[in-house]
């Protein structure tokens, strides 16, 4: 709904407000540039949040700035582009997804990372969900997403004098976000009730437009709830097992009920991890009551319309709850659907006859979905091994869990300068061009010096951003050590490592031999500089110790101006690092990386990957499009594997990567390095983007689940 206006100032303000109210702007560099150019300092101070930005920019001042900077035509053009995007008729989704038009996909996820200004995410799962939602919007796939509005967001990270992570939560200002209350026909806020054992929690919702898609965020912070229940949705992954279980009931059961209250009748359920596995259970309960059939019949019917995506090969990453906790909260459901307590618990157990087995949400998800998939080819193999016992008598290759390898939303992660670069050399429709058979020839025909300079511009921009973050970090910490801010050099090979600090991700593999690393980073004429970022889970002390060891080494004089830890990793930090780094490092202990999509984000930005052959890199690396750590060997002793991988990492850096980067021609351009970058762009960028990923889900899961076409997913 676009706002009627009268005066010139009101027209500009209204059109900017319309742009700000749809998160489509978050992947439109031209729109972002409009807000930034209106007031660069205010744009930065409001954390790149256009709603907050405009609330502090009076219409008269806005009109004056627009006149001074000649922005009126750009604002009008952006407004028209949004109108055309929302009203487009010739889209892939309209051509292919007709069966989903009246009964869309309901995509459930515990977190969504759409932009740094909406802090309802913690890491990779949320980034994947956000990219999936944006990709569905661009393709015009009918999809509505359901998540939770976390009133305190995820924690802000602070590093103390000892290098230890400290967590702080702050209230998220809803009135400065592009959210509106979900209301009924009477205009009053919609509320649904979720029984949680002996009490009932009322749940409201916020709605956000994400391009053509919509996001529904559930919120228990409503009147007439007890204070403890109002706080249930306050923190992402906060609280104990009891709070976590209640959050997952709100997400799954409350999500299905809110969809009904909104008049949305989904034809397909897509569960992004086990956190939302109560959704098909609630839908089956409603189905059984409406159709007058047994719960088992209804559960099977719902399963035929459900896709389940699992993201972790690590056992600890799957939510498990005590049977007493489950029965306490779901006794009402157990009685209503006519199951015994043991029958209800069996839905979340591998061995239904083991009274001591915990209730696993991943098991519930797998038992409630016809379509189940891992997120890379290797992860599919690992997942089938992990859950083979759910299908007794079947060989691993017959386990009905396939894989759809993750992809990333290109426009959210590519630097605007690189986007302009590809438009110049490959044409305005360069996104389609990178899928053409002749793309390798076209990319390799680009002048090496032009490619090099384009990446260098983005790299310098990234280093300036890192410097600003470090100044803020040092000022906040106010320690003598941290106030000595390193100034990194744009001419130096720059490696980045940014991810969650968990033991299996081995953030310290690069630091195994500090003396050798010190020699590498300080080699005369061929230095290396390293950027670290990431958070440890608030309850993971081992992860915090790993992070602390990185921070401590970064303060070692040998690594001054060669290594730094950037605190409070978020969407903004991630975006800048993947855009500007030369080399992206990923060091999981194979095969525990499900996919590792962060490395996919560097491709079109002119960076290369250095990774263990795990996750997506195991199916992407061809020997010329990046670098591998080892050859995919896995030793039975983790300590031996770690030592071997560390040795391979150092050898690859010293003898292959660094010499290649500093091998310059008379024009000071590293031609052999650029050839490898070009090959990575040509061979990988189209295979690992969200467009391909969402199309795969549509063809192999959504359409078959909605009754469109047959699927090749199970047992592929």
Image: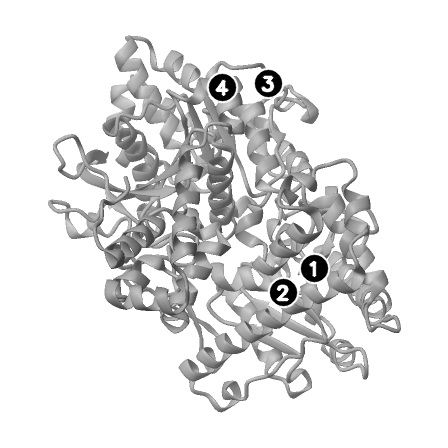
> Along the line of sight, which residue is nearer the eye, 37 or 105?
37
**Of label 3 and label 2, which has the lower sequence position?**
2
Question: Marks 4 and 1: in contact by CB < 8 Å?
Answer: no
**Of label 1 and label 4, which has the lower sequence position?**
1
Callout 1 crowding tier (Cα within 10 Å): few <14, some 14–19, many ≥20: many
Callout 2 crowding tier (Cα within 10 Å): few <14, some 14–19, many ≥20: many
For the residues labelled 1 and 2, the Cα–Cα distance comes to 7 Å
> Residue 11's mark?
none
Q: Residue at x 55, y 44 (%)?
A: 315
For the residues labelled 1 and 4, the Cα–Cα distance comes to 38 Å
Q: How many marks?
A: 4
Question: Marks 2 and 1: in contact by CB < 8 Å?
Answer: yes
The residue wearing badge 3 is 711
Question: Marks 2 and 4: in contact by CB < 8 Å?
Answer: no
Question: Marks 1 and 3: in contact by CB < 8 Å?
Answer: no
**Of label 4 and label 2, which has the lower sequence position?**
2
> Residue 705's mark?
4
């Amino acid at each position: 709904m676009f706002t009627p206006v009268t005066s010139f100032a009101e027209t500009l303000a209204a059109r900017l407000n319309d742009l700000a109210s749809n998160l489509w702007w978050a992947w439109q560099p031209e729109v972002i540039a409009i807000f930034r150019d209106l007031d660069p300092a205010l744009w930065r101070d409001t954390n790149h949040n256009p709603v907050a930005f405009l609330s502090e920019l009076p219409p008269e001042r806005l009109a004056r700035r627009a006149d001074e900077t000649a922005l009126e035509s750009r604002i009008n053009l952006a407004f028209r582009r949004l109108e055309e995007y929302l009203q487009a008729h010739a889209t892939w989704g309209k051509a292919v997804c007709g069966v989903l038009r009246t009964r869309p996909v309901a995509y459930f996820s515990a977190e969504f990372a759409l932009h740094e200004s909406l802090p309802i995410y913690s890491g990779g799962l949320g980034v994947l969900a956000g990219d999936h939602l944006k990709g569905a919007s661009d393709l015009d796939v009918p999809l509505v997403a359901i998540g939770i509005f976390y009133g305190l967001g995820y924690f802000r990270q602070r590093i103390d004098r000892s290098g230890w992570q400290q967590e702080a939560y702050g209230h998220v200002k809803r009135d400065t976000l592009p959210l509106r209350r979900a209301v009924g026909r009477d205009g009053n806020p919609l509320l649904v009730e979720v029984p949680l054992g002996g009490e009932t929690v009322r749940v409201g919702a916020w709605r956000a437009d994400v391009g053509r898609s919509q996001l529904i965020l559930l919120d228990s912070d409503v009147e007439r709830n007890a204070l403890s229940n109002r706080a249930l949705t306050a923190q992402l992954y906060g609280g104990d097992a009891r709070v976590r279980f209640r959050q997952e009931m709100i997400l799954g059961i409350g999500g299905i009920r809110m969809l009904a209250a909104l008049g949305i009748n989904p034809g397909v359920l897509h569960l992004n991890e086990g956190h939302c596995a109560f959704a098909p259970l609630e839908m089956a309960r409603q189905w059984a009551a409406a159709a007058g059939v047994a719960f088992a019949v209804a559960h099977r019917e719902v399963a035929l319309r459900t896709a389940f995506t699992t993201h972790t090969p690590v056992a600890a990453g799957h939510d498990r709850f005590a049977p007493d906790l489950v029965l306490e909260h779901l006794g009402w459901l157990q009685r209503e659907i006519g199951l015994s307590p043991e029958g209800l618990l069996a839905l979340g157990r591998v061995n239904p006859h083991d009274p001591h087995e915990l209730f696993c949400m991943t098991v519930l998800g797998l038992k409630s979905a016809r379509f189940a998939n891992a997120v890379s080819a290797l992860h599919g193999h690992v997942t089938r091994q992990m859950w083979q016992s759910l299908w007794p008598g079947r060989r691993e290759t017959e386990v009905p869990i396939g894989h759809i390898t993750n992809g990333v939303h290109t426009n959210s992660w590519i630097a605007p300068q690189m986007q302009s670069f590809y438009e110049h050399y490959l044409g305005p429709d360069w996104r389609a061009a990178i899928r053409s058979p002749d793309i390798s020839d076209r990319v390799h025909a680009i002048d090496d010096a032009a490619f090099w300079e384009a990446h260098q511009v983005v790299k310098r921009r990234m280093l300036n951003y890192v410097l600003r973050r470090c100044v803020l970090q040092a000022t906040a910490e106010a320690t003598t050590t941290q106030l000595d801010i390193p100034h990194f050099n744009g001419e130096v090979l720059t490696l980045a490592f940014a991810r969650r600090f968990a033991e299996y991700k081995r953030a310290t593999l690069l630091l195994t031999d500090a003396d050798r690393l010190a020699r590498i980073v300080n080699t005369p004429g061929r230095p290396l500089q390293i950027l670290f970022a990431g958070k440890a889970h608030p309850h993971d002390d081992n992860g915090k110790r790993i992070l602390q060891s990185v921070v401590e080494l970064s303060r070692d004089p040998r690594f001054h101006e060669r290594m730094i830890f950037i605190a409070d990793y978020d969407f903004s930090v991630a975006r800048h690092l993947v855009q500007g780094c030369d080399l992206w490092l990923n060091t999981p202990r194979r095969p525990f990386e499900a996919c590792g999509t962060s490395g996919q984000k560097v491709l079109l930005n002119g960076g290369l990957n250095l990774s263990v052959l795990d996750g997506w890199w195991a199916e992407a690396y061809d020997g010329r499009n990046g670098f591998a750590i080892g050859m995919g060997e896995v030793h039975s002793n983790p300590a031996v594997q770690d030592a071997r991988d560390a040795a391979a990492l150092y050898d690859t850096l010293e003898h292959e990567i660094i010499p290649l980067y500093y091998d310059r021609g008379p024009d000071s351009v590293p031609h052999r390095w650029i050839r490898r970058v070009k090959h990575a762009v040509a061979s990988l960028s189209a295979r690992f983007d969200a467009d391909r990923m969402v199309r795969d889900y549509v063809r192999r899961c959504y359409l078959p689940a909605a009754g469109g076409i047959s699927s090749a997913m199970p047992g592929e």
